[in-house]
């Protein structure tokens, strides 16, 4: 009798980075695509294209990356690099996130200094703001599907999303208040649901 084949959702059955160099170039590519909406790019690349993580794992890791100090995507790259190759992987992923984008940003800063007062440049930058907002909203809707499997259930998750939106967008509460209060409530409720 043959052994059962592993489930496609099993962590060992999913594709993984081959080595730290694969992490470096993958995160370099992510960073170079991420102008104005890196969340959308990272989710698409890591979950949909590379399949290094599931949507649920991405939501959980993104939540952790968001509460840590520093840029979310940089935090996420360090977490993923460490998970696969320890300190070498974390350094490779971090270097991929920062090296080439830093060079591109420095070059763009030099160009922008020359043309910043041109009306066409100002209009283009205003237009890109709308595109960035659309990318973030679209990714939010994609990630919402992962909340169906969350221990709190879809209704309580939706209530927390609505409270967060109301606090940040309507009441204009600072992130430093919303994150510990609502995030803390969500953590406690989740822990109580999954604790043995």
Image: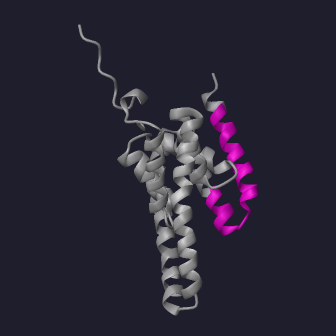
Q: How many marks?
A: 0
Q: How is the image coloured?
A: one colour
Left or right of 148 in this view: 162: right
Asked whether 150 or 45 is in front, the reply is 45
Q: Position of residue 156 (x, y in %)?
A: 58, 45
> Quick check: 78 above or below 116?
above
User: Magenta stretch mostly in which secondary structure?
Assistant: helix
Q: Position of residue 55 (x, y in %)?
A: 45, 44
* Residue 189 among magenta residues: yes
Q: Which residues are magenta?
A: 163-191
Asked whether 55 or 74 is in front, the reply is 74
> For the point 57% across and 33% down, which residue is it?
86
Specify whether residue 62 is in view.
no
Q: Position of residue 107 (x, y in %)?
A: 53, 72
Asked whether 142 or 77 is in front, the reply is 77
Specify whether residue 42 is in view.
yes
> For the point 48% across and 39% down, which residue is it?
20
Q: Quadrant of residue 64?
A: top right
> For the point 34% across and 26% down, which residue is it?
7
Tell me the quadrant of the picture where the N terminus can be found.
top left
């Amino acid at each position: 009798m043959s052994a059962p084949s592993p489930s496609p959702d099993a962590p060992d059955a999913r594709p993984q980075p081959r080595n730290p160099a694969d992490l470096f170039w993958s995160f370099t590519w992510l960073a170079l695509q991420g102008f104005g909406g890196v969340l959308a790019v990272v989710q698409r690349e890591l979950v949909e294209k590379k399949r290094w993580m599931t949507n649920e794992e991405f939501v959980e890791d993104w939540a952790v990356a968001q509460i840590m100090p520093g840029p979310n995507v940089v935090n996420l790259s360090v977490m993923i690099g460490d998970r696969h190759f320890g300190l070498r992987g974390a350094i490779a992923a971090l270097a991929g996130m920062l090296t080439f984008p830093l060079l591109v940003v420095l070059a763009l800063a030099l160009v922008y200094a020359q043309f910043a007062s041109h009306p066409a440049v100002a209009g283009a930058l205003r237009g890109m703001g709308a595109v960035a907002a659309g990318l973030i909203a679209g990714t939010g809707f994609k990630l919402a599907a992962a909340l169906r499997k969350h221990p709190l259930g879809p209704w309580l998750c939706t209530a927390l999303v609505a409270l967060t939106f109301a606090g940040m967008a309507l009441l204009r509460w600072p992130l430093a208040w919303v994150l510990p209060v609502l995030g803390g409530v969500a953590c406690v409720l989740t822990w109580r649901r999954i604790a043995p």
